[in-house]
Amino acid sequence: MDHDSPASSDLLAESRDIWDANAEAWDARMNRGGSWQETLIAPTVEKMLNIEPGQRVLDVACGNGIFSRRLADLGASVVAADFSPRLIELARQHTTEHTEHIRYQVADATDEAQLLALAGDGERFDAAVCNNAIMDMPAVEPLFRAVAQLLKPGGCFVFTVMHPCFNGQSIAKLAELADYDLEPTYSIKISRYLSAEVTKGVAISEQPQQQYYWHRPLHLLLNSAFESGLVMDRLEEPVIKADNPASNAFTWANYDMPPLLFVRLRPFGSPSAP
Ligand SMILES: C[S@@+](CC[C@H](N)C(=O)[O-])C[C@H]1O[C@@H](n2cnc3c(N)ncnc32)[C@H](O)[C@@H]1O
């Protein structure tokens, strides 16, 4: 998808206004606890990043800063950016500890120059992260290109995204009970995968406005990264665990399929890590 076309820059501006309008609802949900951010994303990404105290980390599309603060708790020095001014305002309000180690900034992750400017003094990052936001962006090439330049040799970029194969507007969760079977079979019906497309939907039921989603099949998503000089050295597809899967037939815990994809990339030529 070409974000330079007038139609898509209008979409980008509209997408930012929608995230601003949904900021309070998103913030409240994150602060309530028990979100995927807390139970699934943070532990998996932390393991993939393997942060050491003193490292410099970039958190792209940081939302209300929930993970940026976790990174600072781990001893990192964090630059955190989001294109929603309201979410950045909320992130600043929530930051009462390690204030000298987190710098929040409004920046659009589809604008390579804005991303490169996040280095500030020009010092590169040990790691970068983008949690569950790439599918919210009309273009991914600027982010991959910028990250390839912003990382130190041997640094890594971990991103999580709604799994393009199993999660999105063109999948339907099914629960079927065959006659005489005691247990249902849980499956996913996929009606479209290869077409890159933009749709609208909700991330959380209480958000006032529907947001845009940009679906990209795996080859489009990952080849953009590879063409930017990044190589992949780790991929995770963690399962969702629920206390009581039986309470809702359509809970992800019933499905042997991952709702999120976790990818770790490194500048080409960097040594790999476990
Ligand atoms: C699903 S939320 C995830 C927020 C945060 N990373 C987390 O895990 O809690 C998606 C975030 O992407 C941000 N976002 C979407 N498009 C963006 C863009 N073009 N540039 C920067 N941030 C963007 C939204 O404002 C929102 O904060």
Image (tube, grey):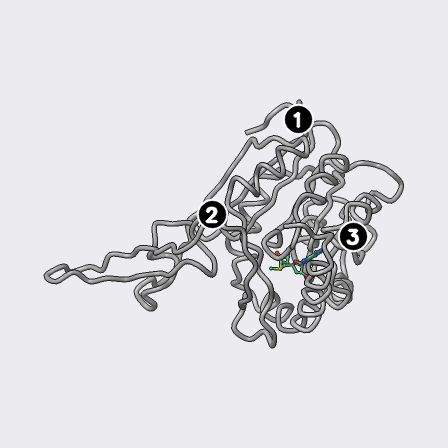
Taking the spot 34% from the left edge, 54% from the top edge, the residue there is 255
Identify residue type, mark 2.
Answer: Leu
**Which of the 4 image quarters holds residue 15?**
bottom right
Is 166 or 66 nearer to us in this picture?
166
Q: Position of residue 76 (x, y in %)?
A: 73, 44
* Sequence-wise first label, 1 or 2: 2
In the image, residue 7 sits, relative to residue 80, either above or below, namely: below
| Rendering quadrant holding ligand 1 | bottom right
User: Toward which corner of the image does residue 61 lie, by quadrant?
Assistant: bottom right
Quadrant of residue 32 in the image? bottom right
Q: Is mark 1 within 8 Å of ligand 1?
A: no
Q: Amino acid at mark 3?
A: Ile
Q: Which mark is residue 145?
A: none
In the foreground, 210 or 266: 210
Badge 1 element: loop
Residue that mark 2 sits on: 194
User: Mark 1 or mark 2: which is in front?
Assistant: 2
Residue tagged by mark 1? 268
Quadrant of the rendering where the C terminus is positioned: top right
Drawn side of residue 96 relative to residue 162, left or right: right
Instruction: Name the residue at the front extreme.
Output: 6
- Count numbered badges in the picture: 3
Question: Marks 2/3: CA distance?
Answer: 39 Å
Please indicate whether residue 100 sits to the left or right of residue 156 in the image: right
Give the residue type that dot 1 points to.
Answer: Phe
Q: Give residue 170's position: percent from left, percent from top.
A: 44, 59
Where is residue 1? Give x, y as percent: 63, 50
Q: Which residue is mark 3?
A: 102
Front-lying residue, 237 or 29: 237
Q: Spatial distance from mark 1 to mark 3, Cα to Cα?
A: 28 Å
